Image (cartoon, helix red, strand yellow):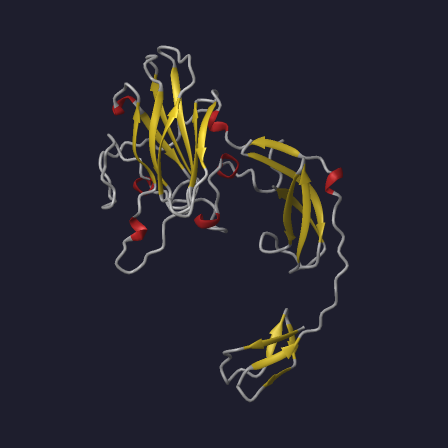
Amino acid sequence: MTFEVISAPSEITAAIFNGQLISTSVNSQGKLSGAVAFMPPTLSLPNFSERRWYSLHSLPEVDEAYSDEAWPICSTPSTSNPQLNLSTPTSLDASDYGFHTSLLLSCGRFAATRSETSAFLNVSGGWIFGHSVWLSSTYLGSWIGGPSNKTEAETFVFPNGLVAGGNYVLTVLIDRVGQEEESPGTDAIESPMGIPSYSLSNRSKTDNAWKIQENLGGKQYLDKSRGPRNEGELFIERMGYHLPLPPPSVEFLTTNFTLDLLQGYDVPKPFLFGTTPILAVLTTEPCFESTGGSLESTFLI
């Protein structure tokens, strides 16, 4: 296997690959090149069809028994975002509560009077974002996103039979793309992310009490190894269940196995769940520290 360094400084006369000094040469254009000996490794992969798998529902927020008591309350009556014309009693913009990364959950609670028939939601999540909406545990619908939409306004019709005095939760799961990158003169990084406006039919906006959740801790994130841009926001990741040995859906599947790979190799491995094929890549890096040999690992889909 050969390599060429296109813009190597002239002072470089040798190269080290995986700790081994390799022979190099410099051509007339000043490009450094060399060859690395490659021997195909012998790989031994576990038989995943024989493993014990565990399944964990990863959107418990729509279950009646779920408590959002520890969630941040959307209580800010103003916004720090100059691009957001606040039209709600309190801000529902993620950045006003220290959330700046990806998937966002907003929950609005209300006590029904039986006059409510629908909810209007104007959701903002950046280019190609999507969102799904539930009334308590009843799925109301989704917006799958598109390349020309940064926001989507839609009315979601409630099922019949809301109980007067009953407590209901409007849950909005926003699969956003994080804050936009800045371009000169655009202030794109200030694009609102969340719910700029909403209304509940035949009710005042103040009848909804909203809470918000994203990655665990927001800007005071707990996963110092991967950092906030690589830390997920679904329940399983906020609880740390993506780490080895979680307890026995979005649905989360895990199994434990011994991974016997040479260090530095990424090995594609196909899986078939029902009729849906999934390609995973098994690797000893960067999740594991090893010099090769056997590793006790957790694999997740």
In this picture, is 289 found above or below 1? above
In this picture, is 162 found above or below 301? above
In this picture, is 169 found above or below 96? above
Q: Residue at x 75, y 56 (%)?
A: 43
Say left or right for 266 vs 156.
right
Q: Which of 166 and 157 lies nearest the eye of the viewer? A: 157
Q: How many marks?
A: 0
Q: Residue at x 51, y 39 (%)?
A: 237
Query: Which of the image's four quarters has the N terminus?
Result: bottom right
The percent coordinates of residue 44 (x first, y second) are 76, 52
For residue 111, what is the image quadrant?
top left
For residue 184, what is the image quadrant?
bottom left
Query: Which of the image's four quarters has the C terminus?
Result: top right
Q: Residue at x 43, y 41 (%)?
A: 145
Q: Residue furthest bottom?
A: 28
Q: Which residue is drawn at 49% across and 81% down?
A: 9
In this picture, is 46 found above or below 62? below
The percent coordinates of residue 73 (x first, y second) are 33, 31
For residue 277, what is the image quadrant?
top right
The percent coordinates of residue 72 (x first, y second) are 35, 33
The percent coordinates of residue 163 (x first, y second) are 39, 11
